[in-house]
Every structure is written in structure tokens, then in C-alpha cells.
Amino acid sequence: MLLGVSGLFAKLIQLPALDIIAYRSLLTVVLLLAILVLSKSKIRLNSFKDYKIALILGLLAALHWVTYFTSIQMSSVAVGMITLFTYPVLTVLLEPLVRKKLPSVRDILISVVVTFGISMLFPSLWSSEIALTDDYLLGIVLGVVSALAMALRNIGIQHYFTEYSGTQSMFYQFLVTAIVLIPFVGNTPMDVSVDNWQLLILLTAFFSAAPHVLFASAIHKLSARTAGLIAYLQPLYGIALGFIILAEVPKLMTLLGGVIILSAAIYETYLSNKQAKKLYKEP
């Protein structure tokens, strides 16, 4: 739900997407470092190998965020969000391969159904013709790249970074992102207005650090597949908040899409809990 709010700040903060991501990442690093220090949690990683994994995860996170915002700028919010939310489908297909297994038919069907539900959230894609310009097509490609980067990052967290908490994991991901992007910002800190800094701090504290730490922690408790499928609720939350905050009234098809997504998320959560209880009871 918190991640669903973050999209509203893309309209509220008057800065280029790269600048927003870079400064948000820098502020999040400071916040997470303070949390780690105050809670007396370990900051250093256990081995040089883990630092290499953290670097890869951070680069994947940076690629995901930059390509997502660029996709929206080159196409539309609807296309950017729909292409991004193919990542649970990609996770369903890729995660079993890491375990040297084939994806289950159930997971594939759920992913396809929910992807259809996501597309229904944006009726304009169904009712109006879209000019497939070069920029528009590139936006679609970048959206898929963003989804792939996110899927790989989530799988990497679950399979190669399980020794560390969600806070530690996201600290290093935001650190790498900040280091990579800060040199390319178009506005220096002195150029950013007080209002934009206030919004950036609000975005960082409540809608960046907290939800990403919670999501990384969820991946440790669930599979990346299940966490990804439940995350399909994010655009639904975004539309609901858009109605409450921006008075954007959703259409009937949007509501039907929301019902599909919510039903699939509840079903997946139920099956995950059922499987967890079964494993817990086994000696």
C-alpha cells in the first residue's frame, strides 16, 4: 500500500525522474544507516562475496527504477505500470529455474489472469487508439526491462542474500543506486526548492524506506514468487489513493480489474499460508 502512494510523488515533485530517484536514494541511505546504528544492527557484510552480491542487487535496483520512470515519460503512466507489473510473471517463470524446477501451471495461470486484471485498471488502453511511435515502443521495452530487473533483484535477495535483514539489504541497494545516479543529476542540492525537499523527505521516510524494507523482509518469509504476486495490489492501491487524494474517479472496467487482482492476491495468500502450515506441521 505504501508503494502505491509513491507514484503520486512523481507528479507532486517538480524534478526530473533521475533527480527524484537519486536524491530519494541518498536520503534513504542516510535514514536506513541511522536505523541500523540506533538499533545496533550489523552494517558490515560477512564476506567479500556478499559485497559483490550487494553490488549486483544495487545495480539491478537502479536499473529497475530508472527504466521504470523513463518508460512512463516515453509512453504513459498506464503502459509504464502495466509493463512493470509483468515482473511477477517473470518471477514465476525464472525463480523455479534457480531451483532447477519448472514453473507450476497454477502460478502461470494466476499470473496471466492478474496481468489481464492490471490492463483493465486502465480502460483508455482498451477504448482509444494508441500511436505506436518509436518513443512509445521504446517506452514499452524499457518497462519490460524494468520488470526483468526487479524480478532478478527479488530472486537474488531470496536466494543469495538471506543472511541479512530487509533493512541491511535495502541499505546497500539504495547506497549503490545513489552512488551510480548522483553524478548525473541535473539539479544540484542548492537548486532544489524547499517545497521539493520537503516532499522528497516525506517520500523517503514513509513511501520509500519503509515499504522497500518491508518488501525485502517479506521475500525472506515468503518466496519471491508469492511476494511478487501479492504486490500486484500496488496499482490497485494507487488508483484508490488517486480517488481519495486527487478525486480521480475510476471507471467500471477499472473496478472489475481491481476485483480480479484482489481475488487472485487473496487466493495466493491463502495457498501460501496453507503450504506454510503444512511445512510447519511436518516433523
Image (spheres, rainbow, N blue to C red):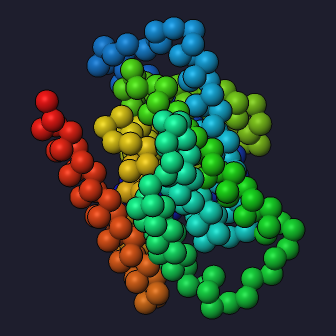
Residue 112 locus on image (x, y percent)? 51, 68
The answer to whether any part of residue 235 appears in the image is no
Residue 36 as seen in the image, left or right of residue 127: left
Residue 226 as seen in the image, left or right of residue 133: left
Would you place residue 148 above or below residue 82 in this image? above
- Going 49% across and 26% down the picture, which residue do you hit? 160
Residue 183 locus on image (x, y percent)? 75, 31
- Closer to the camera in the image, 241 or 58: 58
The answer to whether any part of residue 281 appears in the image is yes
Residue 108 locus on image (x, y percent)? 48, 61
Q: Dividing the image into 4 quarters, which one contains the N terminus? A: bottom left
- Going 47% across and 30% down the picture, which residue do you hit? 159
Would you place residue 243 above or below residue 101 in this image? below
Q: List the single residue furthest toward the right.
A: 134
- The quarter holding residue 53 reads top right
Would you place residue 78 above or below residue 38 in this image? below
- Closer to the camera in the image, 40 or 151: 151
Residue 275 as seen in the image, left or right of residue 238: left
